[in-house]
Image (tube, grey):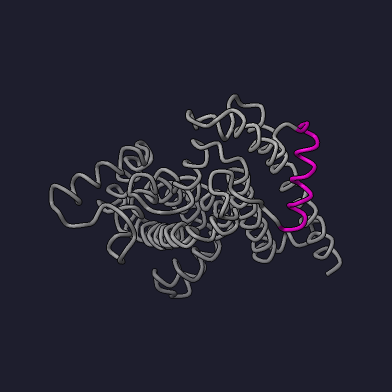
Amino acid sequence: MGNFLRFLIKKLIEILASLAVLAALSFLLLKVLPGGPFDEEAALNPLVKETLAARWGLHESLPTQLGKYLLSLIQGDLGISMVHPDQTVVAMIQQDLGNTLMLNFVALVFVIFSAFALSLLSLRFRDGFFEKSVDQLMIAFLSLPSLFWGPLLIYFFGFYFNLLPVAFLTEPKNYILPVLTLSLRPLATLVRLLKTSLHENYNLDYVRTAKAKGVGEWRVLTHHVLRNSLIPFLSYAGPLMVGLLSGSFLVEMLFAVPGLGGQFINALSDRDYTLIVGLTLFYGAMLIVINSLIDLVMRWVDPRMREEV
């Protein structure tokens, strides 16, 4: 219990330090880039621009601006959008957060269930047509990026066959094409990882012992081999969620999904400093928390890690 408590304290310190570094780097990198949040307003009077810059403290030194921003973060305030001064950054994130989370959640569930099903079936029908077909399909998924699959799926299923909608998330069938686009490469990676782990465990002595006792093939696969193959899956769960979150930026743009991805792209084009840093911190916090939770689950599943601090 003492080791676990020390691990939690250490992990909390790491999370806070990571967020502080992320906030500082995001803020400073935006400041060193040329241009400003009001430069695109061609008709804006120079005196008005000066007034706006003074209001937002853009003429203050970088350390002063950074210090004020970090102080507001400690108080739980992400600031007000520079482009939409009537909205807070928190409110803008909440506005489109639901669509992004739902899209990523559906894609994550699809990837996990499909990967386990395909891997187990490939092992059950190993060296046959099914396994070879799955291998070839996964190679195709890995070889081509989402930028290829997205337009291809839109053309065939949206326009050529006219079977599925290609924009927005108004009903369940709207999720099919964006979820497929977002999931194909992570699915292929996870299938290859699980297949390797399942094959390694299937050839161990405990499997032969279970078979010798008369345990059926499916029970051996699901109750013995699969259980001992979960550690590699958990180790990949963090990068899997990171990949889905980052990949959803492009998918949201392709399928006109009103989510955080499109909001982030618009914030970059508008040089909305506070919104950019707010979204970066939000994504960073989600990814850090996800990786920390995965680390905790792995320590619970693998007894060898419980004694590590």
Q: Is residue 225 magenta?
A: no
Left or right? Give the position of 56 relative to 164.
right
- Residue 167 position, x and y percent, is 29, 53
Q: Residue at 43% across / 60% down in the picture?
A: 99
Near-viewer residue (125 or 55): 55
Q: Determine the residue located farthest toward the bottom in the rendered image.
A: 214
Name the quadrant of the C terminus: bottom right
Near-viewer residue (290 or 255): 255
Count the labels in the image. Answer: 0
- Residue 237 position, x and y percent, is 55, 55
Q: Residue at 30% across / 45% down in the picture?
A: 137
Left or right? Give the position of 245 relative to 71.
left
Vertical arrangement, residue 219 with respect to residue 143, above or below: below
Q: Magenta residues?
A: 60-76
Near-viewer residue (80 or 5): 80
Vertical arrangement, residue 50 with respect to residue 158, above or below: above
Q: Residue at 20% across / 51% down in the picture?
A: 158
Q: Determine the residue located farthest toward the right in the rendered image.
A: 2
Q: Residue at 59% across / 31% down in the picture?
A: 36
- Residue 124 position, x and y percent, is 35, 61
